[in-house]
Image (cartoon, rainbow, N blue to C red):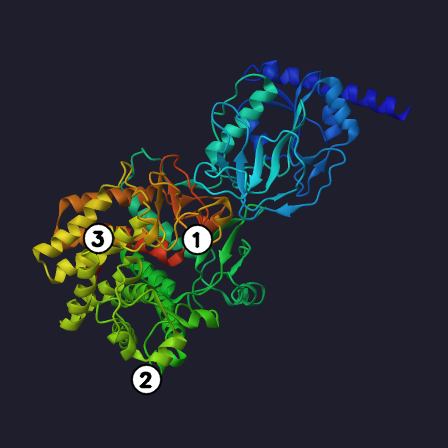
Amino acid sequence: MFIRKTVRRLASLAALCLCTLGASAVGGKTSVSKGDTIWCVASRQNDLARLLESEGFVLVRGGNNLTALFLAPQGAPVLLLGNGSTEPVQLSQEEVSLIERKGLRVYADYTAMPGQEVQLRGVGWERVVVTEKMGQTLKPMDLLSINRARFFPVKGVRPSMVIARVAGFDDAVFGLADTQTFPLVDHPKRNICISTARLSDFARLRLMPENRWQAFWEAQLSDLLRREVHFGSWPTRVTPAYTASEQLPDTARIHAVRKGVEWFWAGHLLVHPSWKPDYLDKYQVIDPPVGPELPADAQTGDGSLGILEGHCSAIDADGHQAYRYSLRTDVHGESAMALALAAKLLGQEKYAQTAHRLVDVAIKEGIAGPRNDPNNPAYGLVSWGFSNDYLRSVYYGDDNARFLLGALLAVRLLGEHQWDDQLRRAIDANFQTTSEDGFRGPRLEHADVEKNGREFYQKRHLFNPHPHYESWMWAVYLWLYGQTGEKAYLDLAEKGISKTMAVYPDGLRWTNGLQQERGRLVLPLAWLYRVSPTDEHRQWLDRVVNDLKANQVPCGAIREELGDPSKGDFGGPRNNQEYGGNEAPLIFHNGDPVADMLYTSNFAFFGLNEAARATGDPAIAEMTKRLADFLVRIQACSTECPGVDGAWYRAFNYRDWNWWASNSDAGWGNLSTLTGWIQSWIVGTLAMMQMKTSYWDLTH
């Protein structure tokens, strides 16, 4: 009796819904055909449901799966998208029988079949691999990502997408034979398609790349409606500031600078004391120092306690992006530079005051303890960071160089001199731990410096043609020579540069790619030509700049390039299991359409502006302008994710105009942000270009 009454009530409700549907379809502005009607269960916030309604589809909603299936007429398309819960749904045998009896065509999101065990696990380094052609776009081995989503492993029947740890850029280059796979989209029955993770909230969860997820949903809807479906729009929460082709307004560059420095506040990156118990104490002492993003209403500091590194390239199962909580000294000098330049350009005293505090805390903490003891061999060296003991025990020459370059410009612009002695000592400490050949090596350990003493490093023979680690300290020595005329600094820098250019490019060591080594060479070559304008020095500069220019694509981006694998520190993964196991490039093959704002474009941009001003060469100036326009276009914009609004991500895919790339780098993947390395050199150079000046001109 109860079942018969329930069926009668559902039938009456179905008739009422269909009458309402008919009235709205006829009376509305657009006539909707029967094929445009979909029966569904979905929350009001569901991304797919909202998209379908905005595209003119009519959704007949049921409060739960059973109701929607009863309401749907024979052979109808049905979307079971859940009620917004973070937990998966399980179909009952009654619901499956109803689907089969009525011949319904069903897609069930984040849904298990009857009897399937549901034990959630999280995605780590796995990505999504297409295993069956879908629509006209997606083909087997194509790659997508669901970030760090939760899913439940099941035994698949006919999966069209799987979750697996695989190497590759656009496709799984090594296939699936040697890696464990888990069905993501499966077809357990002829007319039932399920997913084992939430896919219909693609915008909120920031599934990537957007163009492939759009193709996936177009294929699903085409199957359900038995006609070809193409969406006229696609919702996304983070977008580039401009398209590849639209005309940039005259204010674009200055707007990018303002948003770029305001990101330090909007992104909750300036440390506040209230963060200490729940965030700093928990995440600064672990390796890696990664934790959840701060609450939207978290307080932001004033710079006196430092600035965080930025975002980790990991978006969690709720669509939030993880933070890196370490305090690195180089980042403080770089961020202070960007803020001081923005203060000069925009007249904002807040920026100048914050720059002052960042330099102050970096010197107090980064050149403290034994580094502030005249009797210690480490006297004057700048620690890698100061949020844990490990960071205090390491001295990267390149990090010392970038801290110095940032802090030196910041204090000049601020008109302050209280740190002059510490900054000069830091230059001398690096100079006195550089070999007589002009090379210093990647890093020194504090214990080794105390054991060996400075003379050991000065007198050793070392050949390290590795610009990523060596070249910007040469630039610091050339800058100091330009200030003081002390020739020893010019001689040592010129010696290292000369030996490096003698083996350029085939003999260069490279870190994550060969292109970044070219990008790092531009600055010291530009300043060498400044202080010693010989024909040979100009030829060296032109050679490197022209090689970069050969890799600058029409939109202004500089394409990444891999070198001889035997000379690379971190090449691409050689098999599926190596994916995510170490530092790595953003590309897999040369020609993959990606620019790198962490290792290449950021530093090349700064160096090219210096080269254009040093030489007066209009061709270099035009190349710099094109790169500037590209960087302005790809700045992240978001009202719904304010933590990244105004940031630049590490990667940009200029073919698809999105941030898709290989995310294999263990710490710094495609969606990384960095207050120092990325943000500050881009913001700072844009500000200098807006003021028609250069670092050299501002400090000499």
Q: Earlier in the sequence, mark 2 or mark 1?
A: 2
Q: Image quadrant of residue 552?
A: top left
The three-letter code of the residue at mark 3 reads Tyr
For marks 3 and 2, give the one nearer the viewer.
3
Residue 402, x across and y down, in percent: 31, 63
The residue at the point 59 percent across, 19 percent down is 225
Q: Earlier in the sequence, mark 3 or mark 2?
A: 2
Residue 253, x across and y down, in percent: 29, 46
Q: Which residue is mark 1?
A: 668
In the picture provided, is 193 more to the left or to the right than 433?
Answer: right
Residue 636, x across and y down, in percent: 41, 45
Q: What crowding class fits label 2: few (fewer than 14 Cα within 10 Å), some (14-19), or many (20 or more)?
A: few
Residue 454, x across and y down, in percent: 29, 78
The residue at the point 37 percent across, 58 percent down is 676
Q: Which residue is mark 2?
A: 374
Q: What crowding class fits label 3: few (fewer than 14 Cα within 10 Å), some (14-19), or many (20 or more)?
A: some
The answer to whether residue 438 is above or below residue 591 is below
The answer to whether residue 316 is above or below residue 330 is above
The three-letter code of the residue at mark 1 reads Trp
Mark 1 element type: loop
The residue closer to the viewer here, 94 or 21, is: 94
Residue 504 circle label: 3
The residue closer to the viewer here, 237 or 434, is: 434
The three-letter code of the residue at mark 2 reads Pro
